[in-house]
Amino acid sequence: MKKIVVFILVIIFSTTTVQACDICGCGNNGNYIGILPEFQKYIIGVRYRHNVLRSHLGANGQTTYLTNHEKYSSYELWGSIKLSKKMNLLFTVPYNYNQQVGETVNQRIQGIGDINLINYYTVFQSNQLTKQNKVFLQSLRAAMGVKLPTGKFDMVISNVSSQLFTNGTGTLDFMLGAVYEARLQNTGINFSSNYKLNTENSTGYQYGNKFQSSAQLYQKFFVGMDFSIAPNLGIQIEQNNKDQNLGNEVGVSGGDLTTINYGAELKFKKVLIGGNLQTPIAQNIANHQIEANQRWMLHFSFAF
């Protein structure tokens, strides 16, 4: 068991360079969901994501007449279906609303985004008492999924080119990941890591692959039998390389981003409410020509 845990930690904190996806989750394709929900037979809910960035920056990140302020909002229907004792299928159906404003451009697009399907398989799950008579829980889940090309890919809108400003990538992409969680009584830690393999779309554009890893501490507080609140604090690392367009490397793409994440999860009987805020603490995106600002997410779900 100790060897398995060490192996997972090595994977999660590896600094291997991989290729970029939607430039460090700045667009609508970020997949951070916070602490993985306790799997019931079914979960259904809605999520709202909001990302803000500045693009087309000048030297040293300076604002120029070409600089745009971009906002990416996503309304998501999401849920979980228990397929078997060890398998749970998570799905996400997004509807995007994007806005790009600058001295030379003012445009908006909206529409359905790319649907995600991810299957979580429970490798092991244990529940035991320590010598101090405290409950110690731990679990390891492996994930495998696909992203479907349901969103429209249109990289040039109003004569402005942007690989971010589009509802979909136009590709069938694949995801691999793992989630390890350990909890002593009501104090827990969650490690997650995932890798996204992107393919080339019909126009010859290929978003690079993406590696993402996070760690979160949380504390559960109970009020009676039915209500609990779990504040959490963590860190997330995203590493990227360059996209490809017709086999040529796209210079204004790729990079890396590190954020501090903090939020809370509330549970009242079968109702789940939560949210988190991601604040960048270090970044180098598209050779400093893109600057990510705060990202946040809210969700409301029902378990049954």
Image: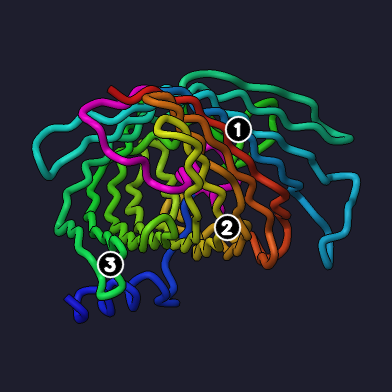
Residue 297, x across and y down, in percent:
58, 37
Range of residues picked out in magenta? 22-44
Within-10-Å neighbours for mark 1: few <14, some 14–19, many 20+? few
Please name whichever residue, 218 or 177, is drawn nearer the observer in this view of the structure: 218
Mark 2 is on which residue type?
Leu
According to the image, label 2 marks what residue?
233
Type of amino acid under label 3: Asn
Closer to us: 272 or 174:
272
Q: Residue at horizontal 35%, vertical 58%?
A: 195
Residue 92: x and y in percent read 37, 30
Q: How many marks?
A: 3
Q: Residue 133 got which mark?
A: 3
The answer, for residue 93, to whether it is visible in the render is no
Nearest the eye: 297 or 301: 301
Structure colour scheme? rainbow
Q: Residue at x 60, y 32 (%)?
A: 156
Q: Which residue is mark 1?
A: 156
The amino acid at mark 1 is Val
Q: Residue at x 28, y 58 (%)?
A: 178
Asked whether 28 falls inside the magenta stretch, the response is yes
> Which of 161/207 is in front?
207
Q: Residue 144: in sight, yes or no?
A: yes
Badge 3, how many Cα within 10 Å: few under 14, some, many 20+?
A: few
Dot 3 falls on a residue whose secondary structure is: loop
**What distance separates the C-alpha of mark 2 from that of mark 1?**
38 Å
Inter-mark Cα distance, 1 to 3 = 62 Å
The label nearer to you, 2 versus 1, is 2
Is residue 64 left or right of 38 when viewed as pictured?
right
Circle 2 SS class: strand
Q: Residues within 10 Å of mark 2 (few under 14, many from 20)?
A: some
Q: Residue furthest top?
A: 111
